[in-house]
C-alpha cells in the first residue's frame, strides 16, 4: 500500500485539474493518496470539504487508500481510510482518540527518539520518514535527514517506514536498500512531464 504514496493539496498544483491528476496518477499505479491541503492553500473549509469528497470518491472507486493529513475532523467527515500526523501537528494521542477506530494512523518522524516513542503507541500503523533529500514542497520542512539515518530508523521501527522529501527519478532507487517500503511524493508527480513514467519508476524501485 505504501509503495507509491502520492501526497497533494490545492497549493501544490501547477495549473492542473486536481481530480484529473489524481485519476491519472492512480491509473499509472499510485498505491495510496494523502490529501494534504494546507500551507499556501486558499480554500475555505467548505471548499476543502467538497474537494475532499470528490477526491475521496475517486479513491474509493479505484480501491486506493485515501488518507487525510493533519485534520482528524476532516478525515472523519470524509470517512477517510486513514489520517497522517506530523510532529508539529495535532498531538498523536488526541488524533487517535478522535479518529474513527478503523482508520490507519501514520506519523511523521525525523529522529530515532521519535521512532522509539512511536513504537510504544500501538495504534500507529506506519511512519513517514523525511525529508530524506532536500525539498521545496514544504515551507516548514526540516533539514534533510539522509539515507543512513533513515536506515537506522527503519531498523529500530516496529512499523513500516515510507520515505518522503526530494524524491527524484535518480534517488528513488536508493530508498529500498536503506529500509523504506515505499516513497511518498508531491512534486515528483505535480511537476512531472510524464506522470505515468514517474509512478512506474517508483513501482520498479520497490518491486
Image (cartoon, rainbow, N blue to C red):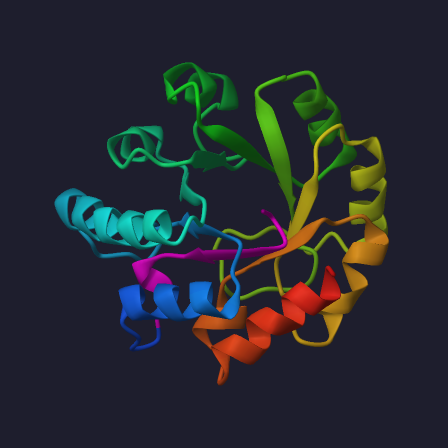
- Looking at the image, residue 30 sits to the left or right of residue 149; the answer is left
- Count of all numbered marks drawn on residues in the image: 0
Residue 83 placement: quadrant: top left
Q: Residue at x 51, y 76 (%)?
A: 196
Magenta part of the chain: 1-13
Q: Is residue 21 above or below residue 59?
A: below
As for residue 205 lying within the magenta part, the answer is: no
Q: Residue at x 60, y 30 (%)?
A: 125
State which quadrant residue 43 falls in: bottom left
Residue 17: x and y, percent? 27, 71
Q: Position of residue 88 (x, y in %)?
A: 50, 35
* Residue at x-position 80% and y-position 64%: 174
Q: Residue at x 44, y 50 (%)?
A: 64
Task: Please tell me which residue lies in front, 22 or 187.
Answer: 22
Residue nearest the viewer, comparing 23 with 92: 23
Between 200 and 82, which is closer to the camera in this rendering? 200
| Residue 190 image position (x, y, % from top left) | 44, 71
Residue furthest to the bottom in view is 193
Quarter placement of the C terminus: bottom right
**Image position of 78 (left or right of 87):** left
Q: Residue 39 appears at what percent x and percent y?
A: 36, 52
Amino acid at each position: 500500500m505504501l509503495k507509491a504514496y502520492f501526497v497533494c493539496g490545492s497549493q501544490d498544483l501547477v495549473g492542473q485539474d486536481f481530480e484529473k491528476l489524481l485519476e491519472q496518477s492512480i491509473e499509472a499505479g499510485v498505491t495510496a493518496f494523502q490529501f494534504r491541503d494546507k500551507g499556501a492553500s486558499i480554500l475555505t473549509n467548505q471548499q476543502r470539504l467538497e474537494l475532499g469528497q470528490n477526491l475521496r470518491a475517486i479513491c474509493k472507486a479505484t480501491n486506493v487508500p485515501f488518507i487525510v493529513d493533519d485534520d482528524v475532523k476532516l478525515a472523519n467527515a470524509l470517512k477517510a481510510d486513514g489520517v497522517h500526523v506530523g510532529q508539529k501537528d495535532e498531538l498523536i494521542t488526541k488524533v487517535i482518540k478522535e479518529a474513527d477506530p478503523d482508520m490507519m494512523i501514520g506519523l511523521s518522524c525525523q529522529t530515532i527518539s521519535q521512532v522509539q516513542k512511536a513504537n510504544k503507541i500501538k495504534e500507529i500503523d506506519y511512519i513517514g520518514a523525511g525529508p530524506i533529500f532536500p525539498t521545496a514542497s514544504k515551507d516548514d520542512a526540516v533539514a534533510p535527514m539522509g539515507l543512513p539515518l533513515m536506515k537506522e530508523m527503519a531498523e529500530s521501527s516496529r512499523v513500516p517506514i515510507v520515505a518522503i522529501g526530494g524524491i527524484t527519478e535518480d534517488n528513488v532507487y536508493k530508498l529500498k536498500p536503506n529500509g523504506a517500503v515505499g516513497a511518498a511524493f508531491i512534486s515528483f508527480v505535480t511537476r512531472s512531464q510524464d506522470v505515468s513514467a514517474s509512478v512506474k519508476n517508483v513501482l520498479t524501485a520497490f518491486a
